[in-house]
Image (cartoon, rainbow, N blue to C red):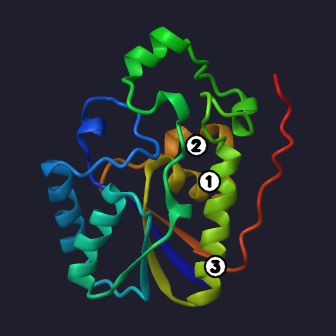
Amino acid sequence: MTEIWLVRHGQTDWNLNGIYQGQSDVPLNETGVTQARELAASLVNTRFDAIYASDLVRARRTAEIIAEVVRLPVSTDPRLREINQGVWEGQSIQSVLERYKPDFSRNPKYITTPRAEGAESLADVITRMVAAANDYHRAHNGGRILLCTHGLSAAALYCVVRGIPLVDVVTLIPENGQLLIIHVDDPISLPEFNYKIV
């Protein structure tokens, strides 16, 4: 069994101001650095076999702060990035609501259909997160690893492993600097994405 600790990066100014980040490369703010340091301090007596991080600076920096405490190098992997939000990136939630009038209902079609032009679907995120997690499971089977990633990406992998309906994914997004823990016994299987579109 491999134990995987999924960490959401610390806060950024875009988090604070309700701006869609997606794969835009936004740094931690002062609060985010503090959150990363507090999380690192709580892990000082926890042994990890490896640390992997999204290559986006907010996740990579969070991982580097933790790595200083647990004394491990950080390996970056673009598969751990946040969902690509397409044309919504850099826009406030309010402006997206006014301009695009998105459907934020728990409609299963949004598992396989991107919500924004040029964006990824949830299924896209799950596919790359599962591939990455399976690679790490093979490399560290029986160990404990830390993945420093992003809110929706962490929640998506958590839902798949725990068998939680994917329409509920947004309810599982951890706060900045918080974590989710999953256990992997066998390679993670992709869920069926042939949901009825309504």
Q: Residues within 10 Å of mark 1 (few under 14, many from 20)?
A: some
Note whether residue 141 is visible.
no
* Residue 116 left/right relative to 71: right
In front: 185, or 198? 198
CA gap, disc 1 and disc 2? 7 Å
Identity of the residue drawn at 35% across and 60% down? 59
Q: Relative to 155, is 103 above or below?
A: above
The three-letter code of the residue at mark 3 reads: Asp
* Disc 3 versus disc 1: nearer the observer: 3
Instruction: Tell me the quarter of the picture where residue 180 sits.
Output: bottom left
Quadrant of the image for the N terminus? bottom right
Q: Residues within 10 Å of mark 2 (few under 14, many from 20)?
A: many
For numbered disc 3, what is the local secondary structure? helix
Task: Sort mark 3 into few (<14), some (14-19) or many (20+) by Cα contacts within 10 Å.
Answer: few
SS type, badge 2: helix
Q: Amino acid at mark 2?
A: Val
Residue 169 circle label: 2
- In the rendering, which numbered label is found on residue 135? 3
Nearer the N terminus, badge 3 or badge 1? Answer: 3
Disc 1 marks which residue?
A: 159
